Image (tube, helix red, strand yellow):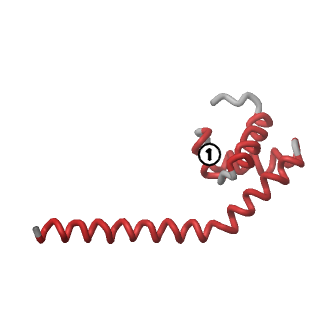
Amino acid sequence: MDFGKEQDRAIILGEYIIKNKATVRGAASKFGISKSTVHKDVSQRLKKIHPQLYKLVKEVLDENKRERHIRGGMATKHKYEEKRHKKETDNKATKV
């Protein structure tokens, strides 16, 4: 996606993060840019060009930061549940 100016990109990213309660990683993936670019746009550029939007984005990112250990734990739990299910399925197949 061609954003034109860096300021335009920062605003678009900020609005996307707020609307979708997205993470930096999620926004980077959606727009096909690096996480460091997203982070710089929403934490440095946005602060200068649109302080009100910056504050709203910061709230979303701070919330994501507070919750990341929970999401990480859920991902780990899911990973091991899938492994256990696969092992049980494999064991049933070999007994038949």
| Secondary structure beneath label 1 | helix
In percent of width and height, residue 24 lies at 66, 52
At 89% across and 48% down in the image, what residue appears?
51
At 74% across and 38% down in the image, what residue appears?
12
> Which residue position is annotated with label 1?
28
- Left or right side of 57 for 74: left
Residue 81's place in the image compared with 29, above or below, is below
- Left or right side of 89 for 15: right
Give neighbour class at mark 1: few <14, some 14-19, many 20+ (Cα, 10 Å). Answer: some
- Left or right side of 57 for 20: left
Residue 50's place in the image compared with 62, above or below, is above
Residue 68 sits in quarter: bottom right
Residue 73's place in the image compared with 58, above or below, is below
- Left or right side of 23 for 18: right
In percent of width and height, residue 80 lies at 39, 70
At 26% across and 70% down in the image, what residue appears?
87
Amino acid residing under circle 1: Ala
In percent of width and height, residue 74 lies at 52, 68
Farthest front residue in view: 96
At 79% across and 58% down in the image, what residue appears?
59
Q: Nearer the viewer, residue 87 or 29?
A: 87
Q: Quadrant of the N terminus?
A: top right
In percent of width and height, residue 58 lies at 79, 56
Total marks shown come to 1
Q: Quadrant of the C terminus?
A: bottom left
Q: Nearer the viewer, residue 35 or 57?
A: 57
Residue 65 sits in quarter: bottom right
Residue 41's place in the image compared with 3, above or below, is below
